[in-house]
Amino acid sequence: MTGTTLTRGYVIIWIWLLALMTVSLFANTLPVSRPAIVTLMFVVAAVKAVLVALNFMHLRLEAWLIYAIATAPMLLVFGLMLALFPDFVLPR
Amino acid sequence: MSAATPTYAGTAGAAARGKVGIWWFLASEVMLFGGLISSFVISRLGGSAHVEHDHLNVTVAAINTFILLSSSYTMVEAYAAAERGDRRGMRVFLGLTVLGGLAFLGIKAYEYTGEITHGFTPWAGTFWSFYYTMTGLHALHVLIGVIANATLCLGARLGLERPYRVELAGLYWHFVDIVWIFLFPLVYLS
């Protein structure tokens, strides 16, 4: 790798991602309730996704238009899921 | 650092258009994977798709997660090298990203082989249908990313590189990584 330099900020983000992956892997061993473990896993996943989007995809440097394009479909998917809850998940 | 820093006159417009275009494409991909993932979540919460943890190889999936997270890092380093005009660095990091993608696909193929030989085929139940659809579609996206990155790596060797192309390929690759970030706990851990 002579002549090839590493970017410190990206290395730090990568280490964080690996650390958070380790937290997810060992979450099942925590002495807390199952819903709490599942919640922790998805909070960790969301944090990892935000770290990748903001730093590796450089979303934090983008204009509002890119934010709008990126967030609109996520809101639609979330809305779709919530709209289906009464029919498929909630007891009748 | 390479001997000469290349100039990319006239690419600013193409880069801006390309970036908006790739984000629109990624938005449609969010709907595709979001629809699938939300269907799986609803099926699980509704009680019709029980995860068969005992038949999934979490260790292998964790190794694949490590590989994909690391390849996302090498991809962003490839872009940083391209921005610096470091052609060699760009080629090295793109090559590492391609290797990461190929390793992911090889491990996934090994995992599928083990599951199918034990009778857990895509038609073995609701969970397995979701499992193969979600992870198979994701693997297809990894394959497309590998081809795109390998093409860029070859282009860099021939002196045809443009930093914005590496950025656009990187946006796609990081998106594929984000999809796996959610699939891993959803399918293997929770």
Image (cartoon, grey):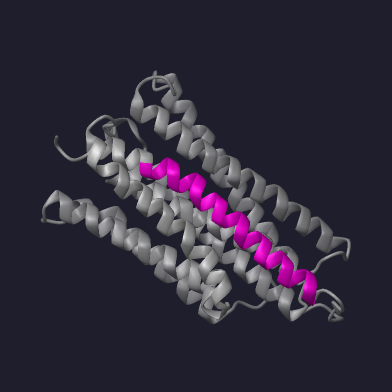
Query: Is B76 rendered above or below residue B9?
Result: above
Percent x, y of residue B141: 59, 45
The answer to whether any part of residue B25 appears in the image is yes
Q: In this view, does B152 lie to the left or right of A42?
A: right
Task: From the viewer's side, name the closer residue of B59 and B22.
Answer: B22
The magenta-colored residue range is B12-38
Q: Residue at x 22, y 32 (%)?
A: B47
Q: Residue at x 37, y 37 (%)?
A: B57
Q: Is residue A14 left or right of residue B141?
A: left
Percent x, y of residue B119: 39, 18
Identify the image quadrant of the C terminus of chain A. top left
Location of residue A5 by image quarter = bottom right
Q: Residue at x 56, y 51 (%)?
A: B28
Percent x, y of residue B41: 31, 42
Percent x, y of residue B10: 86, 76
Identify the image quadrant of the N terminus of chain A. bottom right
Q: In this view, does A5 lie to the left or right of B117?
A: right
Q: Residue at x 52, y 64 (%)?
A: A70
Give yes or no for residue A11 being in the magenta stretch.
no
Q: Is the magenta stretch mostly helix, strand or loop?
A: helix
The answer to whether any part of residue A58 appears in the image is no
Query: Is B7 rendered above or below residue B130?
Result: below
Query: Is A38 rendered above or below residue B127?
Result: below
Query: Is B58 rendered above or below residue B151?
Result: above
